[in-house]
Amino acid sequence: MKAVRFHEHGGLEVLKYEDAPDPTIQPNEVLVKVKACALNHLDLWLRRGVADWKLPMPHIAGSDISGAVVQTGALVSRIKAGDRVLLCPGISCGQCEACFKGLDSACRSYTLFGVKVDGGYAEYVRAPEVNAIPIPGGLSFDEAAAVPLVFITAWHMLMTRAALRPGEDVLVIGAGSGVGSAAIQIAKLMQARVIAVAGSDAKLEKARQLGADFTINHATQSIAREVRRITEKRGVDVVVDHVGAAVWEACFESLATYGRFVTCGVTAGHEVKLNLQALFGRQRALFGSYMGSKAELLEALKFIAQGKLRAVIDSVFPLREAAAAQGKMESRDFFGKILLHPE
Ligand SMILES: [Zn+2]
């Protein structure tokens, strides 16, 4: 099959469109002909190399996959050849304490497509049957591929970690990202009031179209000052962040008493200063969040199927132009998900 692989870590130039062995499935697995694969910021980290993360080489990235099932293993009963499926990106053992509790991402063998196992930058991918979810509603393959990782992540952050309640105020940093566009919609679904932050007016206009009540352009406005003005000095109940150090002080200062800060990533710096007095005195809480569970994806998909949440697609590239697609992500000039199509 054709795939985009890298044999060593590095810049965009290490991504090679080339022949790769066809995957062979285990009895509990299905073989999926990839129709669309969405990029994630994770793909950039993996290509550049992450300390302490040893990847199988050559490596096929891609965690968000939709496609058609072309073959099923002997033990597979729920999924049939011909089914249109999306793949839950997280792979866990299914038989440890964390897995039984539904805490998939706390499983010690937890990984994602495109990390320890081959991902969707390819014509075919193999997947455990348990990860294959029939595409709900009338969703296209593109829409289906754009959903899983960001909606699992945003759902786990807002609903599970921060325990968002109706009527609360939510500050969404990086509103133009996949997680940001999902978080805005989930917060609105919960009847929260949303303040979206991004670095361009074009992105903020799209954030408003997704339901954001207020917007802040961090290139020209002070996040903390605007939050204070909008909330009449009260601050927000929840901050959703994946940027990190560059916005940390503004985020922490923007939290109301009993406010919760939840982070799922650090695209701009991971070391910050924390004022413990302001943490305990204002009874604030900090939450780390990493992916989520299959159950959380199924919960979010119910609303996707009803059209109450939707994947936001920025652009589509042919698989052979994966380097250009990742270059677009690096440029930050996008809103929503960037997709690849195997020819
Ligand atoms: Zn497990």
Image (cartoon, rainbow, N blue to C red):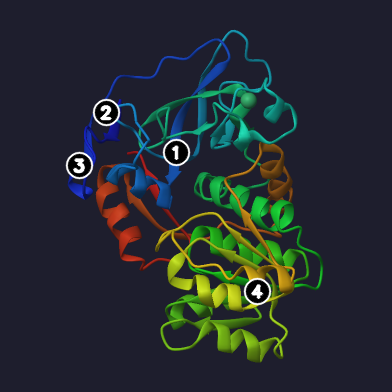
Q: Is residue 77 left or right of residue 20?
A: right
**Depicted 255 relative to depicted 343: above or below:** below
Q: Nearer the viewer, residue 262 or 66?
A: 262
Q: Which residue is mark 4?
A: 278
Q: Nearer the viewer, mark 2 or mark 1?
A: 2
In the structure shown, which secondary structural element does the residue marked by tag 3 occupy? helix
The amino acid sitting under disc 4 is Ala
First reached walking from the N terminus: tag 2 or tag 3: 3
Q: Nearer the viewer, mark 2 or mark 4?
A: 4
**Depicted 285 relative to depicted 93: above or below:** below
In the structure shown, which secondary structural element does the residue marked by tag 2 occupy? loop
The quadrant of the picture showing ligand 1 is: top right
Q: CA distance from mark 2 to mark 1?
A: 22 Å
Q: Which residue is mark 3?
A: 14
Q: Is residue 325 left or right of residue 238?
A: left
Q: Is residue 1 left or right of residue 274?
A: left
Which residue is at a point 61% across and 21% down the rendered structure image? 80
Q: Which residue is mark 2?
A: 58
Which residue is at a point 34% across and 33% down the rendered structure image? 60
First reached walking from the N terminus: tag 3 or tag 4: 3
Q: CA distance from mark 1 to mark 4?
A: 49 Å
Q: Is residue 40 visible?
A: yes
